[in-house]
Amino acid sequence: MKKLNIILLSAICISLVSSISFAKSSEPDAISICSKEYQKVTNDDTICLALDQLKDTVGEYSRDAILGNNLTDKPIKIEFKELSAIKPQYASYDALGMKKGKQLYIYINMKHHNAPPEAIAALLSHEALHQDEYNSINEETYAWTMEANVWVDMCRKNPNLKNEKHSSLANRENILLKMLENANFANTLIRNTVVNHPGYQKLPIKSPGFDN
């Protein structure tokens, strides 16, 4: 899996994840909602709003990782991007994690720029768990389960999210929610989906930090 730019994770699209650079608002007089703590992560208001949604949820761990409490000890840089510009086969991915040198990046598919911030937050809670060049079935299962549980927290705060029909990303999150509910909130169905995912067929069962 070691490449010049190491892909950490990610065909995280289920069939059943602005601007290519960090984008400021096109409105010259608009006031950014991004707080100072996000300065080294992004200055995209949509992403900042999503990061705020992770406060007081099970996704706090992922938010802390994004802010720098991760294996690199550096904030993870996040932006919306046309993923096909990286590789044509990434066009359908919801998001992509990469490592360049010692810097971690999360690229969110541009098509999700107008997704509910709660859905973007859930997606980021997943991606932030991938912090090195090693991946595994156990790691993906943990990340998908984190994402699903963050969405549970979001839906408790805003039950209308369960009926969101206009966002493919929200649809993804609601599929994960159903997997949890149908398995009595165990990760059994999520793990089965990961194991059978065509993008994960070459992954080992275990990786550093995800040995169990």
Image: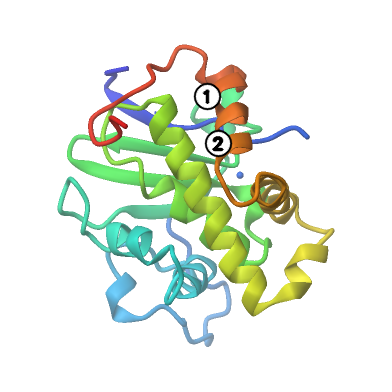
Q: Is residue 210 visible?
A: yes
Helix, strand or loop at mark 2: helix
The image quadrant of residue 41 is bottom left
Count of marks placed on residues: 2
| Left or right, 141 with reference to 194 | left
Q: Is residue 127 above or below residue 125?
A: above
Q: Amino acid at mark 2?
A: Leu
Quadrant showing the C terminus: top left
- Percent x, y of residue 156: 64, 74
Q: Residues within 10 Å of mark 1 (few under 14, many from 20)?
A: few
What residue is rendered at 23% in x and 44% in y? 103
What residue is rendered at 43% in x and 77% in y? 56
Q: Residues within 10 Å of mark 2 (few under 14, many from 20)?
A: many
Q: Amino acid at mark 1?
A: Lys
- Percent x, y of residue 96: 47, 38
User: CB under 8 Å between callouts 2 and 1?
Assistant: yes
Residue closer to the observer: 167 or 91: 167
| Left or right, 55 with reference to 67 | right
Q: Is residue 18 visible?
A: no
Residue closer to the observer: 44 or 210: 210
Give residue 165's mark. Answer: none
Q: Which residue is mark 1?
A: 87
Q: Mark 2 and mark 1: span between their CA atoms?
A: 7 Å
Q: Which residue is mark 2?
A: 83
Residue closer to the observer: 144 or 134: 144
Q: Is residue 119 above or below residue 87?
A: below
Quadrant showing the N terminus: top left
- Percent x, y of residue 19: 54, 54
